[in-house]
Image (cartoon, helix red, strand yellow):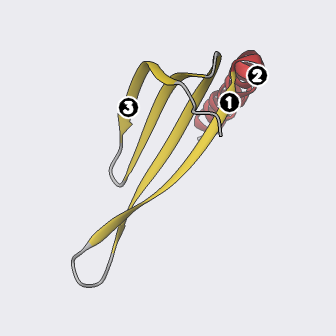
Amino acid sequence: MKKKNIKSKFFKSLHLINKRFYFDLKKINNNFYLIITESNKINLLNKKFFYKKYKFFIHKDDFYIFQYTLSEIIKYFYKKQSNIIKKK
């Protein structure tokens, strides 16, 4: 079995109330990936907690379309939100 060569190139994190997002640009076997990890803090009844994690791997060939799509969604949101504010 071939050993993976993994190197982190750039890292940013975003901390919200009960969530954290980690954005990690990694080089894995000569390919680049943006790895987005969502970590949710789950509180239990006995005052304990655990973190539930979800990971998304985006290959370098998909960076542009991912960025474009995300940008379109955010633009749409702000456009619609401004229309709602104007109606009030």
Q: Residue at x 41, y 23 (%)?
A: 11
Identify residue for label 2: 62
Q: Secondary structure at mark 1?
A: strand
Question: Residue 55 at x, y = what percent?
Answer: 57, 45
The span from disc 3 to disc 2 (Cα, nearest Å) is 21 Å
- Where the N terminus falls, by quadrant? top right
> Residue 13 got which mark?
3
The span from disc 1 to disc 3 (Cα, nearest Å) is 17 Å
**Which one is nearer the viewer's eye here, 24 or 87?**
24
Identify residue for label 1: 58
Eyeballing the image, is 68 above or below 20? above
Q: Amino acid at mark 2?
A: Asp
Eyeballing the image, is 79 above or below 56? above
Q: Residue at x 35, y 55 (%)?
A: 18
Question: Residue 84 at x, y = what percent?
Answer: 64, 39
Q: Residues within 10 Å of mark 1 (few under 14, many from 20)?
A: some
Q: Residue at x 74, y 19 (%)?
A: 68
